[in-house]
Amino acid sequence: MTNTQLPEKKLLTGIPASPGIIIGKAHLVDRSRVKILYQYLINEDQINREVERFKKALCITESQLLQIKNRMPERMKDHSFILDSHIMIIHDSMLKDATVEKIRKEKINSEWALKKSFEEIKLLFDEVDDYYIRSRLTDVENVTERILRNLSGNNDTSLSQINGRVIIVAHDLSPADTTELNITRVMGFITDAGGRTSHTAIMAQALEIPAVVGLEQATKQIREGDLLIVDGNSGQVIFSPDEDDIIAYQGKQLRHEQYKSFIARTSHLPAVTLDGQRVYVMANIEFLEEVAAAKDYGADGIGLYRTEFLYLRSKGIPSEDDLFEDYREVAEIIAPMPVTIRTFDLGGDKFMAGLKTAREMNPALGLRAIRFCLKETKIFKSQLRAILRASTLGNVRLMFPMISGVQEVLDAKAILHEVMAEMEKEGIPFDHQIKTGIMIEVPSAVAMAEALAEQVDFFSVGTNDLIQYSLAIDRANELVAGMYQPFHPAILRMIRQVVSAAKGAGIEVSLCGEMAGDPLCTAALLALGINQLSMNARVIPLIKKIARTISSEDARDDLEKVMTLKTATEVRKHLLRTMSELLPELGEEGILDLSGGAR
Amino acid sequence: MEVIKNLTVSNKLGIHARAAARIVELVKKHRSTLILAKDGKEADGSNILSILTLACPKGTEIKARAAGEDCEELIVKLFELFDSKFGEVS
């Protein structure tokens, strides 16, 4: 039986803009557009007065923005440039002069003239190809709306006067609005408009309050005082939730808080096992921008820097200088910790803009990575030069992907030496001792591991491809994707073989597939002899924590049992049992979920 | 007096809001005017929206034309601003 008194529970999904979960009451802020009326001005006197009125509104707008800027809390000072640019927009000739001209020439009122100027600016922005710049039109819109509000004399309740702890529900919040929020009273906010890169999202993150944007219908459907659950992690907003929802989300909220505080407490400490073995927990990154986050999460270095991104942009093959700039920055930021730069893995399912590649029936087995590089040596050499140039500016290591046998290593190294000789001649400095390694991700490389170990300084096991190639499973094919089993006993045996070859030759070995970040695998991988793991930065604190609870001796004993198991299901079950005995609190799916992308 | 200089946008984000704001700030401190040109389109250097809508991502070649008594200083400062990547931190 349903109780008709209670409003129906509803769910809205938007874009998660700032993480965290909150449960609280809705406070609607009416930032809706001011109604604009058309007025025709009859004489010169009226026109002059109208221009004065417009200019006065601009003055008021400017002083409001200045005031907001000065009241900005210290930790948001970084974002004050947003307000500076808003102030510049007030005085921009496209807005100010154009509007004054319209008032005079077309004899229309300020509001109407301003609206027309805005429409003209909008047309200009619409023509711009660049998404980021196009989205800056919202800044112009924010300023225009504020001027219109001041023209109408409608200075509605300032956001700084909110009473009680609330969740702000608004059509859109300008950066100025966000700054005005009395954050001790605001638990979070949700808006109809906005995107992931909007200033509003950036501000919310700086304030560390949860936010969901782009909900489209929030202000239409939610009423003042409605109970809301806002999940800034998933982008979901539940209004008029039932009791079960509240209990479930309180649990999630608690776990999120716990996870956050444990990251803050422990992520920067080194991970050392109970019996004193150091474990290096590193980050896989794809973009320069991820380095800072990797450091925040406590990474012991960048274990895998995937370099494909710069090649996939529409501008064609990047220049050596562009690549160098990028690698230099990564190396400098992470130094003295190492960064392993993997030469580009293209071909296969990706294609390079501006370079014609033949359509392939089976791209995973096609002309990609090192095979492609050995054919297109010009592109390869330019990348090697960029990496070598960066090598003197930090702790840079070089790695070749998709190696299937010794010949490829010899060929790749020959090209590397050619490049080094050229640079030597040109007098360009580089690290002559740069550590050079290979990815072990093709089954034939596992078989040849001993011979390969003689040729390089380190191995990095790429389990994603190794599993796919060894088990002959195409993960993208949904008919067999379920058979992609990281816990397959064959994979564990292959890792063991690779480690033994590396140890025999005295070279380093690390692991950089998804298995590295899987909490269930940590103990087994340590027992297999891998003490360098590279993963998605978000799971670093969790894996460090797990490593600290492991005794390598116990882990080795347990591994002996694991190695007797015959199926992936048995292995997974066994590891799950061991892990939950070791760390009961981590056994809860909740924490494993929160770590995100662990599996 | 007039000075013309070719500049390349070398910062990662291109001329975005913050960079445009810094150009405007710079021009306002001088008595000269500044015109930025790209592919035959022109933008007024004292005008943030005009600069933004010129749409200059990384790698764009721009012709900067300053006119006025302190135009040389303006161009030097502008060059420094481009060279410093608008103080962009990574």
Image (cartoon, coloured by chain):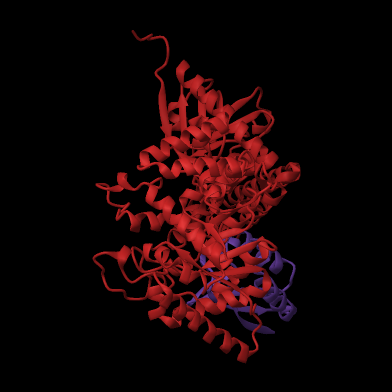
Chain colours: A red, B purple
Along the viewing direction, whichever of A454 and A147 lies nearer the viewer: A454
Along the viewing direction, whichever of A562 and A322 lies nearer the viewer: A562
Question: In what quadrant of the picture does the N terminus of chain A appear?
Answer: top left
Image height of A93 relative to A13, above or below: below
Q: Residue at x 44, y 63 (%)?
A: A129
Q: Residue at x 55, y 68 (%)?
A: A505
Q: Is residue A241 visible?
A: no
Residue A9: x percent and y percent?
Answer: 41, 21
Image height of A428 relative to A222, above or below: below
Image height of A363 relative to A546, above or below: below
Quadrant hosting residue A24: top right
Along the viewing direction, whichever of A32 and A192 lies nearer the viewer: A192
Quadrant hosting residue A567: top left
Q: Residue at x 56, y 42 (%)?
A: A555
Quadrant hosting residue A100: bottom right
Q: Is residue A35 visible?
A: yes
Q: Is residue A390 left or right of residue A399?
A: right
Residue A461: x percent and y percent?
Answer: 48, 59
Residue A70: x percent and y percent?
Answer: 76, 45
Residue A19: x percent and y percent?
Answer: 56, 38
Q: Residue at x 35, y 10 (%)?
A: A2
Along the viewing direction, whichever of A588 and B28 lies nearer the viewer: A588
Question: In what quadrant of the picture does the C terminus of chain A appear?
Answer: top left
